[in-house]
Image: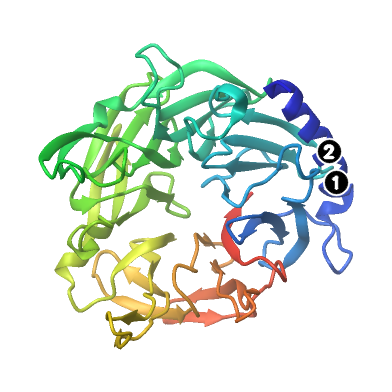
Amino acid sequence: MNEVRVLLAVAAILAGAACEPSATTDVSGVSRPASYAVVASDHTVASISLLNSDGSLLEANFVDSGSTDTGLVTALSGDVALPTQPGSPGVLTLIDRYKTDVITRIDLASGEVLGQIKTHAPNAENTGEGYSSNPQDFVEIDARTALVSRMGPNLAATRSDIDRGSDLLELDIEAMERSDRRIDLGAFDTTGKRTNPDTKKTERVRVYSRPSRLVRLGHHLVVGLARFSFGYDVIGPGMLALVDLKTRWVRGVKLPGLENCPHVVPVPGDPNRVAVACWGFHGGDPRESAGAALLELRNGRLSVQHLWKASEHPGAPLLRYALTALGGSEVAVAAAGKPEQTDSQGNITSMATSDRLYRLDLATGDPELIFEADGQLVIGAGSFDPAEKLLLVPDASVDEKQRPVAGIRRFELQSTGMTELDSVLVDPELPARQVRPI
């Protein structure tokens, strides 16, 4: 079955199985539009739920991995993401990432699948062993055009190949097709040294730009860059890319002393600023190059306003994951916990710690604990509404039976701190990973 026939088959099945037109009727029977989407996943399967403007549950399991017949095409894998910024009103866009590589667009009112786009030409025989473009984010440029960031570089591609990867691919969202246009980010590739594990010799390898999260500021686009080698064993200096959407001219923005900076987010209520989390190098001590920054776009140039380096705050938590901008110079950012460590005799050398979320002023560098989760790498990408002063944070903590115990944590932001509201368990089986406005 060719790609078009497969995608049309999936669309037809999803349209009938995803939901009824009552998707905007909440659990109390009141009809209202959805304000947020939530991804819940155990990394094998996923479900998407919808929330009201106050973070309460509007529609559980709006669409999930079981929305299509097993053995045909899995509608959603366990590696699904939501766009950083909302697009067309009434349309839900889903990004199915590594080894699935599909953008899905769904009408929120009817549940109809508007279409699906594979983010690269299918591999021969569709075995899943070949190139994966690994799409990370999606942003609409106009009513017909969108861009998707493709993190995966294609080593087999020629210079003229549209599927070279590590770029921004243009999509026709009206026809739901790939275009033959891309924004090449190869100018931000670099090289680095590594020790070859086979020969034990030092060698230089290419470090790819690897674009991730996207934030649109007017006719400019800010692109988070991870900058890793193909094997993720060599890293490049921290950098963002700034794209002029009118001219398609691209320039780099350096983040001195930081590395691995894929996670860029908009600052609520401010059309000219972004915040970025840099996660540091996992192959060494991440504190040496982890941190966060606040940047402002002015006269077509993106410049750093505040830079917070973990290396300059040795007594502070290692803040680098799941950043959410709160306005001004404040962000909410997570410090990842660590599992219990033992020596070769099985003796405990360090106790397990859990994820913690902090409120951090990037101007002063003073973190304030918001909450502690019950596990490691469980605090996900959240969302903040300045009008409602509402912070929503996914907490994927689970119990001994691997069932979620938290869901979406809700907080009211106050000048003196955070007031925690009731949490919302969006799925009794799958832990919440991400929440975004729609």
Query: Does residue 184 appear to the left or right of 27 in the view shown?
Result: left
- Helix, strand or loop at mark 1: helix
Q: How is the image coloured?
A: rainbow
Pinpoint residue 248: horizontal percent, then vertical percent: 38, 21
Q: Amino acid at mark 2?
A: Ile
Q: Nearer the viewer, residue 232 or 324?
A: 232
Question: Who's the residue at 78% across and 34% down the image?
Answer: 11
Mark 2 nearby-residue class (10 Å; few <14, some 14–19, many ≥20):
some
Residue assigned mark 2: 13
Residue 200 figure quarter: top left
Q: Would you identify the image quadrant in which residue 277 lies?
A: bottom left
Left or right of 224? Residue 174 is right
Residue 417 percent coordinates (x, y): 43, 80
For the N terminus, the quadrant is top right
Res 203 label: none
The residue lying furthest to the bottom in this view is 347
| Residue at image mark 1 | 17
Visible in this render: residue 327?
A: no
Q: Amino acid at mark 1?
A: Ala
Extreme residue in the top direction: 160
Q: Residue at x 28, y 41 (%)?
A: 227
For mark 1, does the 10 Å Cα neighbourhood hold few (<14), some (14 to 19), or many (20 or more) residues? some
Circles 2, 1 touching at the beta carbon (< 8 Å): yes
Q: Residue at x 46, y 80 (%)?
A: 371
Residue 356 lies, with reference to residue 433, above or below; the image says below
Residue 148, image x, y percentages: 50, 32
Which of 295 and 358 lies nearest the eye of the viewer?
358
Reply above or below: 11 against 74: above
- Secondary structure, mark 2, is helix
The Cα–Cα distance between marks 2 and 1, rounded to whole angstroms, is 6 Å
